[in-house]
Amino acid sequence: MTTTEDDPLAGVLVLDFSQFLAGPVAAMRLADLGARVIKVERPGSGDIGRQLAFAGRRADGDTISFHAMNRNKEGITADLKDADDLQRVKSLVARADVLIQNFRPGVMERIGLDHDSVRELNPRLIYASVTGYGEEGPWKDRPGQDLLAQSLSGLSWMSGSTADPPVPVGLSIADHLASCHLAQGVTALLYRRERTGRGGLVQTSLLESMLDLEFELLSTKLNEHLGPGPITVRRGGKYAAHAFLPAPYGTYPTADGYLAIAMNPVDRLGALLEIDELAELTDPQTWWDQQDRIADLLADRLSGGPTDTWLSILDAADIWCAPVLTLDQLIEHDGFAAIGMTQRISRSAGVTDDGSGLELQTTRSPIRIDGRRLTDTRPAPKLGEHDRVIAQEFSALDGS
């Protein structure tokens, strides 16, 4: 896809000063919607995401994860501690629509690129800032990293069984959610600017994103005085998948894999699976009181047959269930192909280190606009790849 005037953010210029995940992915989400994104990196080393390799995998000098989260961008370098480079960057800021940064609190103030300073350069600018834990409070200077944010949020006690230690989510969920919130805030302020002419400041953090994820849990906990007793996280047995939902909610072994079963009447499941003890449990309170017994009976029955056998019975009865796929099974499944979540990006032979070119598969934006999937072949930039071109472009605009 080539950006057109029909793209929602066509004509919007974004300066991406952020690195690694939350900020760069927010900028990429804006690029997918049609914005022009220029990534600003330090000379020599660039974004630390170029070196922090997911699964240790690299291609053409950068990590695969860097390629995935910085596609569809241009790239320049600037030493923000150098007066000449800083002035050059400020000239870009004066023309930009959006600035994204994820430095620790105080860093941009020392450089002179904080919101109050750049607002004087460009009153229409949307300034987007993501931190680890906000700009105030006892955690504000802690490293803003996904596992640490998960740990502080209490999320790690929501998964696993009573026999398990804390179980973190195995992906960067705090970073990804923060990127969505930041991009949402930017688009909202761009819309407000259309009405008022004013720029604005949007802020979020990894911790706030995690706490928003826990809105059901926190809302219930904060209002526990309205109920019969305290709200406490009590994880279930080894098959349970939720600390606050009754049986049968969980994942169960089958003869050749696992089956996930969501909210369903236990007595109906018992009848369909020919488990008499469960068919007798018509009182929903027993689904809470006898969770471990229900789970054990289900596991014993389901382990005696393959996943597809149970799906044929349960799907026909409109029971909420699904196979638990491995990564390989997911990639090979027709359902994965049908949703079309992949795209190809490429670096040309003139850009790659060995001159042979590079083509990678990665995910696309999960958003569809007017029925159209948002895809683009443009890759992540090499470090400083567009220094000369962008310098010439903006010098011409400035008349110098």
Image (tube, rainbow, N blue to C red):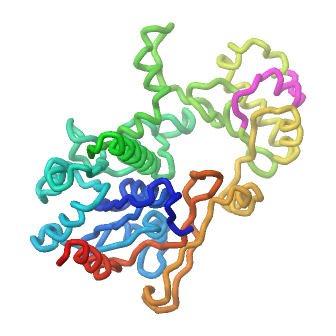
Residue 266 visible to an observer of this rendering: yes
On the image, the x and y values in percent for residue 121 come to 16, 56
Res. 248 image quadrant: top right
Give yes or no for residue 264 being in the magenta stretch.
yes
Q: Residue at x 49, y 89 (%)?
A: 349
Task: Left or right? Give the position of 366 relative to 40.
Answer: right
On the image, the x and y values in percent for residue 320 come to 75, 34
Q: Residue at x 84, y 38 (%)?
A: 315
Tell me: residue 302, above or below residue 43: above
Residue toward you, 187 or 26:
187
Q: Quadrant of the N terminus?
A: bottom right
Residue toward you, 48 or 153:
48
On the image, the x and y values in percent for residue 15 come to 31, 62
Residue 56 visible to an observer of this rendering: no
Q: Quadrant of the C terminus?
A: bottom left
Q: Residue at x 48, y 73 (%)?
A: 379
On the image, the x and y values in percent for residue 129 come to 29, 49
Q: Residue at x 17, y 67 (%)?
A: 80
Give the number of callouts.
0
Tell me: residue 397, above or below residue 154: below
Residue toward you, 350 or 94:
94
Outermost residue, bottom direction? Answer: 355
Magenta range: 261-276
Give yes or no for residue 93 being in the magenta stretch.
no
Task: Left or right? Give the position of 68 relative to 116.
Answer: right
Residue toward you, 42 or 95:
95
